[in-house]
């Protein structure tokens, strides 16, 4: 397996020394944000993890190998490549991308798999994938949910994206036995907004106790990870009342244009960016940085 992975020297040294490391995904760079903001954000997220006392490991597939930690040239190359030329990798796609020697960006699911193989226990992202609206007909449920139930990584997100069916997403996570842990509030956050109108199943405010819960899960032999839902800071949020009509409009357009499968999320994020005149991207950036900060604290408490 090790011959399929390349470690950045800094990440390898930190893991060998038992220092805190935070995994970061690459789909948010290639399919979640436009260039050049995506590059700026990727660098800022790494800097935020460092400020929190941990080493960042951005994960992507390039040249037939899984890269655990990217240098600045690779990060820039990935960020400036059009999303259409980069494979969006989930569990199903990882081995095929490696076999073909193609460039691939890892989603939450694939990043969890790679982080776990690399010995990294904490991962920061923006928002996980979930149950899409209309899933009762389309069966469109992100592989991120299943992955959370089988791979032991603590994922820090600002909730599931509000473009999804959040009640159904919570139901599936419950069925799969995934702990959904809110931080600092009782409600489930909704990505751009602090409140989803739904209660979070669990709450822990202290990062050390989130780390402890991961350790206890492992001791008990319970497979799977934890989903930590960290609300976007108040000053950066777009209130739910503002987001609801925007999301409805973007969803209606996606349906009209027959957007399906892996294209749905990138299409909706782009349309919401246009409809909010860039405000959704500002919020997305703020929440990712906020998650990187918390992930560094959880990682520091795990070692
Ligand atoms: N967080 C963001 N932007 C994103 C994502 C997360 O702020 O684009 C990506 C993650 O990689 C996640 C994916 O796994 O969106 C979900 O895609 P889908 O709904 O197609 O499963």
Image (spheres, rainbow, N blue to C red):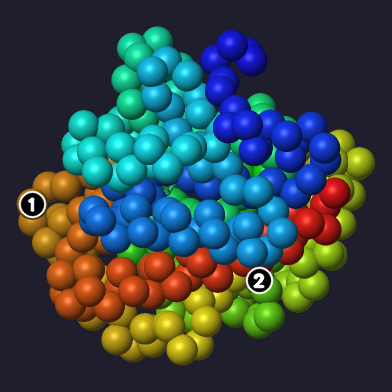
CA–CA distance between discs 2 and 1? Answer: 35 Å
Seen at 54% across and 59% down, the residue is 47
Q: Quadrant of residue 224?
A: top right
Check the image and report above or below for 59 versus 97.
below
Query: From where the camera sits, is residue 116 visible?
Result: no
The location of residue 260, given as percent across then percent down, is 21, 43
The location of residue 7, given as percent across then percent down, is 60, 28
Nearest to the observer: residue 84 or residue 223: 84
How packed mark 2 is, by other alpha carbons closer than 10 Å (few <14, some 14-19, many 20 or more), is many
Q: Is residue 240 left or right of residue 190?
A: left
- Per the rendering, the mark at residue 108 is none
**Secondary structure category for the residue under label 2:** strand
Ligand 1 within 8 angstroms of badge 1 C-beta: no
| Quadrant in which the N terminus is drawn | top right
**Secondary structure category for the residue under label 1:** loop
How packed mark 1 is, by other alpha carbons closer than 10 Å (few <14, some 14-19, many 20 or more), is few
Check the image and report above or below for 130 versus 88.
below
Seen at 55% across and 75% down, the residue is 231
Number of callouts in the render? Answer: 2
Seen at 66% across and 82% down, the residue is 185
Residue carrying label 1: 257
Query: From where the camera sits, is residue 97 visible?
Result: yes
- The tag earlier along the polypeptide, 2 or 1, is 2
Q: Is residue 171 left or right of residue 96?
A: right
Q: Is residue 61 left or right of residue 184?
A: left
Nearest to the observer: residue 142 or residue 70: 70
Ligand 1 within 8 angstroms of badge 2 C-beta: no
The location of residue 141, given as percent across then percent down, is 41, 45
Residue carrying label 2: 182
Nearest to the observer: residue 11 or residue 249: 11
Q: Can you name the residue that lies furthest to the left here? A: 257
């Amino acid at each position: 397996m090790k011959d399929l992975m390349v470690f950045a020297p800094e990440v390898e040294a930190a893991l060998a020394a038992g220092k805190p490391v935070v995994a970061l995904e690459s789909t948010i760079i290639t399919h979640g944000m436009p260039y050049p903001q995506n590059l700026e954000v990727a660098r800022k997220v790494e800097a935020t993890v460092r400020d929190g006392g941990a080493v960042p490991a951005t994960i992507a597939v390039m040249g037939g190998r899984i890269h655990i930690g990217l240098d600045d040239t690779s990060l820039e190359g990935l960020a400036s490549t059009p999303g259409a030329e980069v494979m969006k990798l989930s569990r199903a796609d990882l081995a095929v991308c490696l076999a073909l020697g193609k460039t691939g960006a890892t989603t939450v699911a694939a990043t969890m798999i790679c982080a776990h193989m690399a010995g990294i226990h904490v991962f920061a992202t923006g928002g996980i994938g979930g149950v899409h609206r209309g899933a009762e007909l389309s069966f469109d449920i992100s592989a991120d949910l299943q992955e959370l139930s089988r791979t032991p990584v603590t994922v820090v997100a600002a909730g599931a994206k509000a473009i999804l069916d959040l009640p159904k997403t919570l139901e599936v996570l419950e069925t799969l036995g995934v702990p959904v842990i809110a931080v600092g509030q009782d409600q489930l956050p909704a990505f751009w907004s602090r409140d989803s109108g739904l209660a979070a199943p669990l709450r822990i405010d202290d990062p050390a106790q989130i780390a402890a819960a991961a350790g206890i899960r492992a001791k008990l032999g319970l497979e799977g990870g934890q989903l930590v839902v960290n609300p976007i800071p108040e000053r950066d949020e777009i209130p739910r009342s503002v987001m609801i009509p925007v999301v409805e409009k973007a969803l209606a357009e996606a349906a009209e244009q027959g957007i399906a499968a892996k294209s749905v999320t990138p299409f909706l994020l782009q349309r919401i960016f246009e409809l909010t005149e860039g405000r959704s991207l500002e919020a997305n950036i703020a929440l990712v940085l906020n998650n990187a900060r918390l992930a560094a604290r959880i990682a520091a408490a795990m070692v």
